[in-house]
Amino acid sequence: MKNVKKWFAIIVFLLPGLLLFIGILIAPIAVSAYRSLFDWDGFTEGTFIWFKNYKELFTSKSIMFGNALKNSLILAFFSVFVQLPIALGLALLLGRKIKGEKFFLSIFFMPVLISTVVIGQLWLKIYNPDYGLINQLLDLLHLENLKHVWVAEVEPIGIFKNVPFLKNIPIALGSIIVPTIWQYVGYHMLLMYAGVKGVSTDLREAAMLDGATAGQIDRYIVIPTIKPIIRVSVIFAVTGSLKTYDLVRILTNGGPFQKTQVPSTLLEDMLFLRNRYGMGSTISVMLILLCFAFALVITAVFRERDK
Amino acid sequence: MKKTDTKAVIKQESVTEKAPKPVAQVFIWIFLIFWTLLNLFPIYFMFTFSLKSNAEIFGENIIGLPKEWLWSNYSTAMNTGKMWLYFLNSILVTVAAIAISIMAGMMATYAITRIKWKMSKLTNAFFMLGLTIPIQASIVPVYVILSKASKVPGLNMIFGLNRYTTLIIPYAAFSLSMAILICTGFMTEIPFDLDEAATIDGCGFFRTFFKIILPLMKPAVSTVGIYSFLQCWNEFMFANVFISDSVHRTLPVGIKELSGQHTTNWGPIGAALVIATFPTLIAYLFLSKKIQASFIAGAVKG
């Protein structure tokens, strides 16, 4: 009797959560995986075509998934190698008992709270070719030759002209990368700052007594201690870049000429522009697999380095 | 200087003043102030151009304070742009989604952490899968189900595309894993003696949950609530794909539509951006510590 009561309670307590979780997350993923093997328009039954969607995804010249994936990986590259170092630098500086530490922390975190759609609209006004902030300021400074159409420009970014790998990044993609970095530096800084503050003051003082400079303390004590947090930040930055959608939709809509297309916008186009629900499901499945794969690889890399 | 002297000097410093040396401090400050301006300037620009006329924004007065404060931009955004409706929609959708996910999350956490059974750890791990699943993963099937439900008479009154539930239920589902993660942290800290005492007094699982555990979970509710609030308030992809009529639009989609219609008139767009942003920023002024703490709680274990 007691057991019946217990199991009844367990089931009742779990039921709402399980219904939501299975109904909206788990079952749809299973359906996505199944439907990714179909040529399907979303309304008819569709035809089962095995892995042809996956093959087409990576080979088709009209879908250009490779291009979309490359764009999101470029975003991931800049997030990891530009955004995270800035965030780490700020977190370490604020961890040094700077006057106004809490004030700076609060300001730097502020952009995280603003909706990406608002950020996107705001930057559209900054980038506007005729009346935008950047071009108007360039006019005032008589630097007309630096003016660009920004979000609609296929031209590669000037400063990377001689850098291998980066020399073909169009300005349009660059104008998505800048606000993304700008918005989320504060987020990663906050996580790292929480880690920096967790380093025991005894350890710091002992190092100081041994004559270590602030830089050495950061390098040899603080950074190794907050490594798990850095790992989480790297995973968030990479999977966040793979999932990116809002800023692309608002700033460039994937254009010009698909140059800024990312997997999520491609997924939406498959549904609404081409009625290809099977292919849309394939992109969903690829996104889940890529997010999990990158999370595992990043964790493995960090573990390897610890040895 | 002899070694002992350096030690003495450093020791003295570390005891009295742990901050860096004055020169270094100045450089750090210059850098931090530069970064502060970089963070605040776009927000300042947004606020000022929301109160300007096109003539000022387009050349007369690009970055200064408005010469003439055009509050009419706000009434244009509110009335012609229907921002008041989108604002109320956002509040309704967000609050309902958070309420559902917190309630479902706390109940699940109770079953997982405070009732002893074999599969509880596994169930928890199952829910934690949700932390890494991207929102895009379920968009195609959910969209198809919603559009099919829209064609069923009766059911389409409450469920289907272009309803409030269209967003509330997915938002609640996608907030659930984080709610369980955070609630687990809080709930395991409540002493288990309380449950035992309650059982001795004749309370069943349900009375124990509602009368004893729930009242002690207030800090968890605010942590989860703040975190989920920002996720739902700012969510754009589902809102953009699932809602096509203007009656059920939330703020992010409303802003996108407004700026599509008013491409040549920037003031009202700026006003709409401010309307969507300032509630969060004002709340942040008063609750900055709490908000930061909830973001840390949401990431450290994730």
Image (cartoon, rainbow, N blue to C red):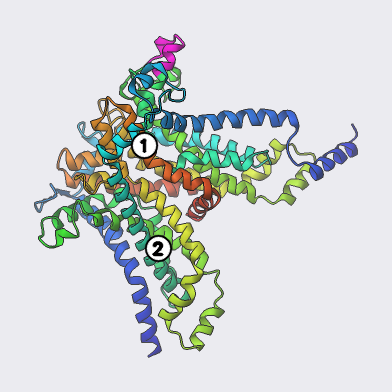
- Tell me the tag on residue B273: 1
Residue A79 horizontal/vertical position (percent) = 46, 36
Q: Which residue is mark 2?
A: B102
Is residue A203 something that shows in the picture?
A: yes
Amino acid found under the numbered disc labelled 1: Leu
**Spatial separation of the CA atoms under disc 2 and disc 1:** 29 Å
B252 lies above or below A35: above
| In front of the other: B110 or A57 | B110
Amino acid found under the numbered disc labelled 2: Ile
Tell me which label, 2 or 1, sits earlier in the chain: 2
Residue in the image at 25% along x and 33% along y: A64
Element carrying mark 2? helix
Q: Is residue B286 left or right of residue B61?
A: right
Disc 1: which chain? B
Residue A125 horizontal/vertical position (percent) = 36, 26
Q: Are marks 2 and 1 on the same chain?
A: yes
B171 lies above or below A134: below
Residue in the image at 11% along x and 51% along y: A43
Residue in the image at 47% along x and 64% along y: B183
Residue in the image at 49% along x and 46% along y: B284
Kindly report the secondary structure that dominates the magenta region of the rendered protein.
helix
Residue B229 horizontal/vertical position (percent) = 40, 52
Tag in front: 2 or 1: 1
Give the residues drawn in magenta, as a range: A135-147
- Tell me the tag on residue A116: none
